Amino acid sequence: MALIVQKYGGTSVGTTERIVSVADKVIQAKMQGNDVVVVVSAMSGETNRLIELASEISAQPAAREMDVLVSTGEQVTIALLTMALNARGCPAISYTGSQVRILTDSMHSKARIKEIDGTRISRDLSSGRVVVVAGFQGMDGNGNITTLGRGGSDTSAVAIAAALKANECQIYTDVDGVYTTDPRVEPRARRLERITFEEMLEMASLGSKVLQIRAVEFAGKYNVPLRVLSSFTEGEGTLITYEEDGVEEARIAGIAFNRDEAKLTVLGVPDHPGAAHQILGPIGEANIEVDMIIQNVGRDGTTDFTFTVHRNDVQRAVEVLNKVANDLGAREVNSDDSIIKLSLVGVGMRSHAGIASNMFEILAKEGINIKMISTSEIKISVVIDEKYLELGVRALHDGFGLEKTA
Ligand code: ADP
Ligand code: ASP
Ligand code: MG
């Protein structure tokens, strides 16, 4: 008998009709002889609605209370799904994160899972029940409710699968797998039958929200067999593999993009040792994460220093930089939040030179100016004007031959 963990996202449980059809899918897996644990998200839009309610009350609600609030969305869906299963004659029981002891650190709104005690779940499974667990939430060592960051139910599912040594973790969503790029931006995107773990990790970290990055990290750490599938249609979905055998040599897996970054530049920085540290040190102390960094070649004793941060942090970063610029004797601080980061990902880059220049040529032909570039072993990222997002994605998709083959 196999043990399967299934996760259903917001759209998949977005209405009571959808919840009933999820119950049918769960029963189907159970009837095939599997033990089934189901992890669910809140109904689509619910988490945003709760965040909005809080903002009507307070500009800066306590992080602890935010987690108490936003974790309620998932409590609704575990109960409704369990009722639907019971109504169909399937024994089932629901649990919140803390009831099954999903132990996290205390970083409210972005907590990390430290440990899961699978005893209660295992006991229920052996008595023939389907176990339905609330995604996105856990509790810290002091019993406070925590949440795992947006999209965190993916991580709950993978972590539970790892703790129970499940045979497969299935992420059911509103697309039927991982595509060469977001099918909402490029309708000609193609579903991948397989994607390597490393590629998936890059795609997720570069902005493909189909899987939360931490879910992919967790899957890699514990070698959890992971599959992304549709809750609306039948199919094999996309398997995340841990071997690169059988992957075509020249392979580009796909294109990811991130709309959440902004660019900051300090102009006229005195070109002397320690300047980069003097700029990024205070940024780090303000708990602002930095992504891409470039420093221009110095001329006339000064240089320009540019880096990107999350858009939510721009205001704070500018405040920090204005002070730094003053201390350093730099000329000016600029910020630009109308940029996006576009990335090409593929293990084929390891063995194929020239992919970067191909990418730049394709973008140039469309008249898209590149503002920043960064590369690593299996990815190339560029920062461009946000108005070129669709054009850039589609041109690269076409230029690298990623479109549907049929
Ligand atoms: P859920 O609510 O089920 O967790 P999400 O909205 O978090 O669903 O993730 C699914 C969405 O991810 C899709 O609707 C799609 O628009 C988006 N997406 C972004 N990049 C990709 C990609 N490479 N492949 C498939 N979907 C992607
Ligand atoms: N409900 C949470 C969110 O909207 C978690 C999730 O759906 O994975 O981010
Ligand atoms: Mg999601």
Image: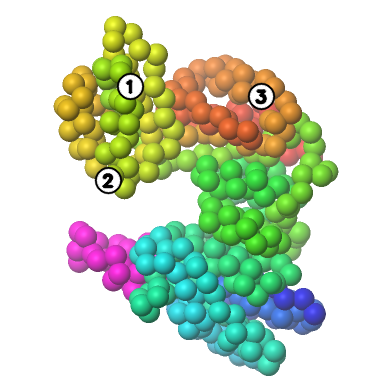
Residue extent of the magenta highlight: 45-71
Question: Which residue type carries mark 1?
Answer: Pro
* Image quarter of residue 126: bottom right
At x 57%, y 16%, the residue is 365
In the image, residue 106 lies in the stretch drawn in magenta: no
Among the 4 quarters of the image, the one containing residue 181: top right
* Separation of residues labelled 2 and 3 (CA atoms): 37 Å
Q: Which residue is mark 1?
A: 273
Q: Percent position (x, y) of residue 77? A: 49, 77
Q: Quadrant of the C terminus?
A: top right
Q: Please identify the dominant SS of the magenta region.
A: helix
Residue 122 falls left or right of residue 72: right
Q: Nearer the viewer, residue 395 or 194?
A: 194
**Residue that numbered label 3 is attached to:** 355
Mark 3 lies on a secondary structure that is: helix
Residue at the limit of the structure toward the right, as seen here = 246
Q: Nearer the viewer, residue 76 or 102?
A: 102
Dot 3 amino acid type: Ile
**Residue at x 23% of width, y 64% of height:** 61
In the rendered view, tell whether residue 218 sits above or below residue 388: below
Mark yes or no: residue 17 visible: no
| Mark 2–mark 1 distance (CA, rounded to whole Å) | 22 Å
